[in-house]
Amino acid sequence: AYPFKGVDFIGFDALLDDDERMARDMARQFIEDKLIPIIEECNREGRFPRELVPQMGQLGFFGANLHGYNCAGMSNVAYGLVMQEFERGDSGLRSFVSVQSALVMYPIYTFGSEEQKNYWLPLMASGEKLGCFGLTEPDFGSNPGGMRTRAVKEGDEYILNGEKMWITSGSIADVAVIWAKVKEEDGGKNEDGGTDVVRGFLVETNRPGFSAHDVHGKWSLRASVTSGLSLQDVRIPAKNLLPRSGGLKSPLMCLNQARHGISWGAIGAAMSCYDTALKYSLDRKQFRNEPIASHQLIQEKLAWMISEISKAQLLALHVGRMKDDGKVGHEHISMAKRNNVWMALECARMARDILGGAGITDDFPIMRHMMNLESVKTYEGTNDIHTLIIGQSVTGISAF
Ligand code: TGC
Ligand code: FAD
């Protein structure tokens, strides 16, 4: 074990301001002190390290790029650097923070009433309340617009029915942001291919008819909770509707926030793999009693990794700065998510190769990152869906 010093080949640090460096260093220290000593055990046992939640709240990591309501008010770049450090530790803990921040606090902040914001955001910023985001369904993953979950208005209540699948933090959440179709006369704002419109609802998870069952047997994100949700005649007060949500665009706006965080997070996982492989290659001797780092084929792999990590940093920074300036398009975020997750997975595979047999054990973090990144490649829009989003942007033709 050794303290992580970061990976910076091109003087990337100089492109950051003091607040951004401070946020990154605070997250780095937290991960080094609190997560690294326990993560392999959590991964083996399939355990989410819930004991870290209160301190994560105290340090301002939840909803860190939101302003007011006890949130830290960081820039998008500072938030991204925090995600990088979390995923350097483990993609599962980064997922947990992404969901709490980008997929639950952000929709409340953006589409919620003042009453909803005042109640939920401070409790979620401190980690006293946890959330989950229910968009995906068993039959609708890449095409969430086909969802079957419905909300029907009855008096001053909505009644929700449906199934959600692959929901991060589903069984530990106090509140679920559930995306459901409603008839336009029941509160839909605009026509969405007929009379239905997708809207967001805050569903407290202790309501009768709501249940969550965990997905077991995962080889990936083992330190994160993944659940299916079932809603059977769940009654919620009409005021639990997120009043400014309307249309599929609303959940997709949340995905932009999370995808931006992932584009930084993936760099952290890649840094961990590169750093481990570099150190190992300098220690390990084969053939002429020289370190394997002296062989050209090993150097080629290390050169590839550091080049791709550096390019990914610049892409994430540019997209993050565009986001801070309010000039980013969702296709730019798709490019950063797609490229950086691909890059990280390739780094994990190369790093594993450099470690030889030792690379398959959990004495090193590489195989865990590799398995985690298989999920990261799929969730928040698969690699192929992001290819098609970029393709649509450059050609003007939808190929979904
Ligand atoms: P389409 O007709 O293209 O779009 C509907 C409306 O939305 C607009 N739009 C977006 N707006 C904001 N951000 C985006 N990223 C947007 N993409 C599209 C679009 O302009 C349109 O607006 P309007 O005004 O005309 O109504 O919709 P479509 O049904 O054809 O689907 C498009 C597609 C395939 C790109 C989209 O559905 C998609 O991104 N699919 C992937 C699904 C996905 O990413 N699911 C993620 C679930 S959450 C999760 O995985 C959490 S993992 C945990 C963690 O984060 O760690
Ligand atoms: P599918 O959509 O069935 O895709 C299968 C394959 O077909 C992929 O390779 C895909 O790229 C390809 N494909 C699909 N459509 C096309 C097309 N038009 N053209 C070419 N290829 C296509 N969802 C949530 O709502 N909330 C969460 O918190 C959440 N957390 C998750 C956590 C984990 C660990 C995982 C694995 C998933 C999570 N998801 C969550 C769901 C995730 O977003 C979906 O898995 C993802 O969107 C893909 O959907 P799918 O698994 O149904 O795959």
Image (cartoon, rainbow, N blue to C red):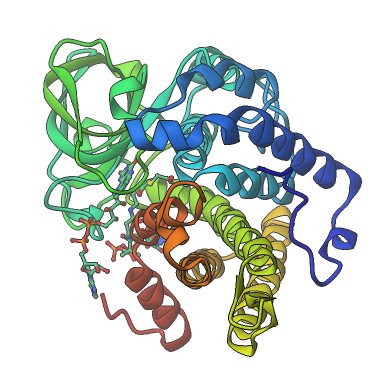
Residue toward you, 72 or 25: 25
For ligand 1, give the image quadrant.
Answer: bottom left
Asked if one can make out residue 287 in the rendered structure from this viewpoint, the answer is: yes
Residue at 54% x, 64% y is: 333
Residue at 86% x, 67% y is: 11
Question: Is 172 drawn above or below residue 145 in the view shown?
Answer: above
Quadrant in the picture for the C terminus? bottom left
Question: 293 left or right of 372?
Answer: right
Q: Position of residue 325 (x, y in %)?
A: 74, 57
Residue at 67% x, 18% y is: 58
Residue at 33% x, 73% y is: 384
Q: Position of residue 302 (x, y in %)?
A: 64, 76
Question: Is 131 drawn above or below residue 191 in the view shown?
Answer: above
Callout count: 0
Question: 219 left or right of 306?
Answer: left
Q: Position of residue 76 (x, y in %)?
A: 69, 48
Asked if one can make out residue 327 in the rendered structure from this viewpoint, the answer is: no
Residue toward you, 9 or 200: 9
Q: Position of residue 103 (x, y in %)?
A: 45, 38
Question: Which quadrant would residue 276 be assigned to in this image?
Answer: bottom right
Question: Which quadrant would residue 275 be assigned to in this image?
Answer: bottom right
Question: Is 212 drawn above or below residue 397 in the view shown?
Answer: above
Residue toward you, 267 or 64: 267
Quadrant in the picture for the N terminus? top right
Residue toward you, 73 or 351: 351
